[in-house]
């Protein structure tokens, strides 16, 4: 077997593996990248199993009845129409199931709300139609920039072939270090937007005149994409969010570069 | 279509103007019911046209036929027209036709107000539809028109606000009429707990309408003065609060959801026993479940707002309250199943639509419970998952029940049978295309596609194409429904007075078609 055909086979196998991964995330939440997102993912799967069990129980009975208790089979109708005991049972069982579902959810709600003691605080501002990021506290304090869709207009208008990250790419990524608690303070300048990164399970409405907060702690490095999820006008579909999670050293480097760039910009401005 | 020579020998009251004036001046509950139903079908086609536009734009990634602003107008008006123009008037039409006949009354309590509450609707519809042609275009802030975005739009938004005022006034009048009719005009011997379930669900729905429509009128008025007269109810810069709008809107909006589904529960609770040839299981628990759902629906509104940043106590309260609604809803489903159990079932079109209703509504109920769980909802809020969820409860819920009701009562209304074979085609095609359109939207939402976007990332392309094909199929199927109804009215076979063997309610004691004035002498209920 030539080395070329081995490479082809390995490549094909990898491609199959990759596309099967893509398949699974197509039917479900994206792969969770934080502890909270993992909780949400697990609770959703758990709730789906409960739904499936109820579905099978209820429609098992109903479709059995539909198949067997038909007039065309000569089935004679019974005449019962009341049973207090049965009513009590099928009120109590759903209540119990709901308690089982609500308990873990309650814990997660409280954890999601706990924005105390962050390592880094970033103010996120929604604009029509882009995001503004201001690093308020922690490493990188003082960095401030806008983040806009970088997909060329021609791709949207079907004049050019669409790129891999069509509509999910921006000019300036939000860069954060891995494993650090990042608190985002979310607000807006004009209308209501919503800042959403599915992989971290963070979604917070950005409301003009109000500040709300949320937090995430990324487990792994990588690039994670989200979108504005509150209708904010014409270009609502065109203001994505890209979070780049990097190693702490790389983050320090990025902070230094950013600060140097802004210092030189200030100097230029002062000289002018 | 319901003019018939009187059979009881007192036809002197059947005089009415003919031609157009019959419909303009009518105070007859059957004529008004007919107009409501035709109006809602016309609006259903308009709203459907907008839906086709949305699905056509979303057929492929990229902007093809609708520019983003127009796309937003399409989604906004699609929602408003379907909710206020199609589903609600259809149920009021059913109530107009059926409530007096089912309680043994000659007509509605306030016959002239009944006329007025209908004739407001075409005016409101004209305002909504014509707003597409004014400078600035139609409202584009979503059917929930949250400020400050809705403060930005042009004249179309003001037209929408006036339309909502009118639709609200019409609904309130209709609701008061229904309450008064049910409470005062029942035949002797028909106690509240002997009323058909359709009448019960409408009584409770009417109370919900009276409770929440004024709230909506209030909030749109505040929006109107914010837009035109310099007030700042919802403008933070002037000391207002944009989130306040959402609280008031959803205080109306969540009961509104049940306004659209409770009469559907009533319809299904009539049809299932009829075709199971067996009394409804747990009648009184059905009544209590309906009432509990109505009461609970007033304390769950903020589950539409889990991402606005409520305190955790608020999130938890609304999560628990919302999950609790699953209990009475579950009781209903179990009761329907128990009604079918050991019945002697046949599967005519009304029964098919009712079973389809239960099957798909339960799926919508499951996704409802999933959306109730705050951490999961924060992920799926404002995504296609929510779109899938509420179309499962509003299309395969409310709309399927309306279809079932039309097939069920059409023989009584026009004295002719619909074509059973064509009706079955309508059901199966609707069932197939509905699921093709909306089931995949669950996956789109989970994978992260936001709602109300005219364009999307490439990984969403194939499911969107599937969904669009399903949508076009579903739309065409409803034109087929129009054909079936017209064929029935024109040339259907003569219907018996009681075309369904298992029918037990009072309307089946009347001739088919029902005389222009029914029950001039009230029947006695044992």
Image (cartoon, coloured by chain):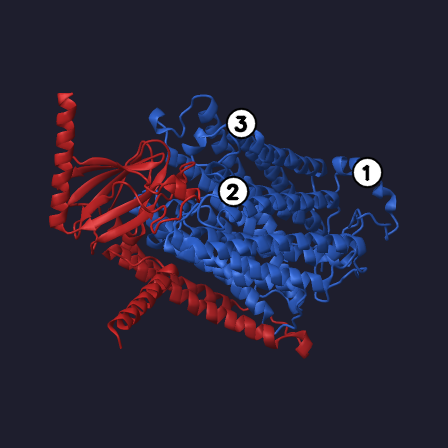
Chain colours: A red, B blue
Label 1 secondary element: loop
Label 2 secondary element: loop
Q: Is residue A197 visible?
A: yes
Q: Quadrant of residue A133?
A: top left
Q: Is residue A204 visible?
A: no
Residue A53: x and y in percent read: 42, 69
Q: Are marks 2 and 1 on the same chain?
A: yes
Q: Quadrant of residue A258?
A: top left
Residue B135, numbered circle: 3
Residue B436: x and y in percent read: 52, 59
Label 3 secondary element: loop
Q: Are marks 1 and 3 on the same chain?
A: yes
Q: Mark 2 falls within which chain?
A: B
Q: Is residue A119 left or right of residue A235?
A: left
Is mark 1 in CB contact (under 8 Å) with mark 3?
no
Residue at coordinates 65% horizontally, 59% vertically from top-left? Answer: B426
Q: CA distance from mark 3 to mark 2?
A: 20 Å
Residue B354: x and y in percent read: 60, 61
Q: CA distance from mark 1 to mark 3?
A: 37 Å
The answer to which of marks 3 and 2 sits earlier in the sequence is: 2
User: Mark 3: few, some, or many residues within 10 Å (few <14, many ≥20)?
Assistant: few
The answer to which of marks 2 and 1 sits earlier in the sequence is: 1
Which residue is under mark 2?
Answer: B65
Residue at coordinates 26% horizontally, 55% vertically from top-left? Answer: A36
Q: Nearer the viewer, residue A121 or B359?
A: A121
Which residue is under mark 1?
Answer: B19
The answer to which of marks 1 and 3 sits earlier in the sequence is: 1
Q: CA distance from mark 2 to mark 1?
A: 42 Å
Total numbered labels placed on residues in the image: 3
């Amino acid at each position: 077997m030539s080395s070329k055909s081995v490479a082809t086979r390995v490549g094909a196998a990898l491609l199959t593996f990759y596309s099967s991964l893509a398949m699974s995330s197509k039917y479900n939440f994206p792969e969770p990248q934080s502890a909270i997102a993992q909780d949400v993912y697990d609770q959703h799967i758990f709730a789906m199993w409960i739904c499936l069990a109820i579905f099978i129980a209820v429609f098992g009975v109903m479709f059995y009845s539909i198949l067997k208790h038909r007039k065309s089979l000569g089935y004679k109708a019974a005449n019962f129409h009341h049973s207090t005991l049965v009513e009590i049972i099928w009120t109590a069982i759903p209540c119990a199931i709901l308690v089982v579902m609500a308990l873990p959810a309650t814990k997660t709600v409280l954890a999601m709300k706990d924005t105390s003691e962050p390592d880094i605080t970033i103010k996120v501002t929604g604009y029509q139609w882009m995001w503004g990021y201001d690093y308020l506290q922690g490493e990188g304090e003082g960095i401030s920039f806008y983040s806009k869709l970088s997909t060329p207009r021609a791709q949207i208008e079907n004049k050019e072939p669409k790129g891999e990250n069509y509509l999910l790419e921006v000019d300036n990524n939000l860069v954060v270090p891995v494993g650090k608690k990042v608190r985002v303070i979310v607000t807006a300048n004009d209308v209501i937007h919503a800042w959403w990164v599915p992989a971290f399970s963070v979604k917070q409405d950005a409301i003009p005149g109000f500040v709300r907060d949320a937090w995430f702690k990324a487990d792994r490095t990588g690039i994670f994409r989200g979108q504005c999820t509150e209708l904010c006008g014409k270009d609502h579909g065109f203001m994505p969010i890209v979070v780049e999670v990097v190693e702490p050293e790389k983050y320090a480097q990025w902070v230094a570069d950013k600060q140097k760039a802004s210092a030189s910009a200030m100097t230029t401005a002062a000289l002018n | 279509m319901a003019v018939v020579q009187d059979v009881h020998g007192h036809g002197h009251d059947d005089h009415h103007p003919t031609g157009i004036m019959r419909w303009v001046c009518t105070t007859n509950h059957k004529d008004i019911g007919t107009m409501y139903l035709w109006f809602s079908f016309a609006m259903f086609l308009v709203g459907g046209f907008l839906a086709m536009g949305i699905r056509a734009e979303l057929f492929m990634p990229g902007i093809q036929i609708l520019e983003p602003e127009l796309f937003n107008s399409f989604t906004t008006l699609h929602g408003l027209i379907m909710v206020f123009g199609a589903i609600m008037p259809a149920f009021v039409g059913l109530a107009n036709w059926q409530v007096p006949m089912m309680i043994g009354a000659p007509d509605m309590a306030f016959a002239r107000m009944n006329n007025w509450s209908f004739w407001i609707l075409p005016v409101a519809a004209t305002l909504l539809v014509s707003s597409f042609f004014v400078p600035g275009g139609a409202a584009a802030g979503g059917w929930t028109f949250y400020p400050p975005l809705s403060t930005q739009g042009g004249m179309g938004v003001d037209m929408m606000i006036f339309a909502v005022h009118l639709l609200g006034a019409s609904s309130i009048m209709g609701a008061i009429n229904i309450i008064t009719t049910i409470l005062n005009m029942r035949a002797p011997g028909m106690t509240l707990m002997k009323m058909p379930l359709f009448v019960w669900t409408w009584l409770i729905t009417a109370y919900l309408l009276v409770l929440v429509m004024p709230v909506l009128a209030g909030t749109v008025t505040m929006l109107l003065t914010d837009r035109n007269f310099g007030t700042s109810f919802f403008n933070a810069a002037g000391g207002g609060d944009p989130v306040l709008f959402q609280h008031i809107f959803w205080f109306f909006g969540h009961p509104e959801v049940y306004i659209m589904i409770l009469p559907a529960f009533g319809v299904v609770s009539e049809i299932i026993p009829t075709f199971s040839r067996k009394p409804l299981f747990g009648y009184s628990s059905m009544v209590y479940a309906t009432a509990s759902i109505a009461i609970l629906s007033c304390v769950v509104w903020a589950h539409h707002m889990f991402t606005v940043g409520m305190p955790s106590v608020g999130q938890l309260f609304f999560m628990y309250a919302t999950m609790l609604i699953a209990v009475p809803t579950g009781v209903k489903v179990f009761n329907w199943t128990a009604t079918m159990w050991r019945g002697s079932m046949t599967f005519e079109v009304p029964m098919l639509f009712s079973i389809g209703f239960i099957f798909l509504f339960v799926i919508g109920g499951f996704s409802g419970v999933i959306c109730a769980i705050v951490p999961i909802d924060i992920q799926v809020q404002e995504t296609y998952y929510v779109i899938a969820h509420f179309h499962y409860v509003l299309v395969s819920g409310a709309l399927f029940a309306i279809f079932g009701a039309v097939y069920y009562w059409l023989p009584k209304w026009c004295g002719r049978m619909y074509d059973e074979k064509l009706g079955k085609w309508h059901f199966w095609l609707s069932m197939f295309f509905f699921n093709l359109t909306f089931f995949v939207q669950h996956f789109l939402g989970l994978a992260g596609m936001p709602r109300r976007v005219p364009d999307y990332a490439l990984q969403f392309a194939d499911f969107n194409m599937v969904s669009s094909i399903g949508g076009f199929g579903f739309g065409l199927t409803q034109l087929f429904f129009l054909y079936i109804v017209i064929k029935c009215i024109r040339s259907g076979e003569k219907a018996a007075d009681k075309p369904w063997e298992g029918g037990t309610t009072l309307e089946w004691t009347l001739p088919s078609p029902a005389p222009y004035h029914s029950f001039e002498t009230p029947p006695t209920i044992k």
